Amino acid sequence: MILSEGFFRLSAMAGFLIILLVLLFGYLFFEPFLTEETITIKVINKAQFGNEPGKYFVFTPDEVFYNSDNYYHSKENADELDKQIYSGATYKVKVVGIYMPWLPRFRNITKILAINGVPVVETPGLSK
């Protein structure tokens, strides 16, 4: 049985699309393990993303960060973190993601480790 050239092209395109989708969704699931980083930031401003609850922007001199609840990052504490973030303070934070200034793709703040050099102590049982 000889395959036609058109069928081969269609099969190759479908295979390429499947591989691309597997890579994309694989990256989404493994992004926290591949890109997690601990950095120090100085906040110059913060803002809520429209009227949507649980979505905030944190502005620093070098980069804009996103503080939002995210299923893929196992993060559901954006509102609690927003209450701890103030302009002018320096934070040691864990972030996930890749910053691309030419795309609206911001790194997500997942955890605050220290505020102005003072470690943040988490109290077990108080989180939702």
Image (cartoon, rainbow, N blue to C red):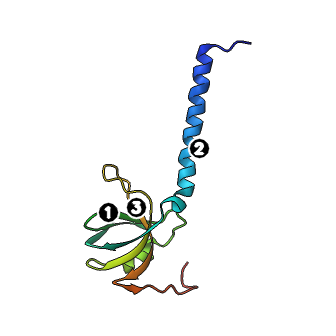
Residue for badge 1: 64
For residue 43, side relative to residue 98 (left or right): left
The amino acid pointed to by label 1 is Val
Q: How many marks?
A: 3
Give the distance between the C-alpha atoms of the residues marked 3 and 1, in whole angstroms: 8 Å
Question: Which percent across, then down, holds residue 65?
Answer: 36, 64
The amino acid pointed to by label 3 is Arg
Element on which disc 3 rests: strand
Can the viewer see residue 71 in this picture?
no
Residue positioned 58% across, 38% down in the render:
19
Point out which mark residue 92 bears. Answer: none
For residue 16, side relative to residue 78 (left or right): right
Query: Are there few (<14), some (14-19), or many (20+) residues within 10 Å of tag 1?
Result: many
Query: Are there few (<14), some (14-19), or many (20+) residues within 10 Å of tag 3?
Result: many
Give the image quarter of residue 22: top right
Discs 3, 1 touching: Cβ within 8 Å: no
Residue for badge 2: 22
Residue positioned 61% across, 20% down in the render:
8
Give the distance between the C-alpha atoms of the residues marked 2 and 1, in whole angstroms: 29 Å
Mark closer to the chain start, 3 or 2: 2
Mark closer to the chain start, 3 or 1: 1
Question: Which percent across, then down, holds residue 75?
Answer: 51, 68
Can the viewer see residue 123 in this picture?
yes
Residue for badge 3: 107
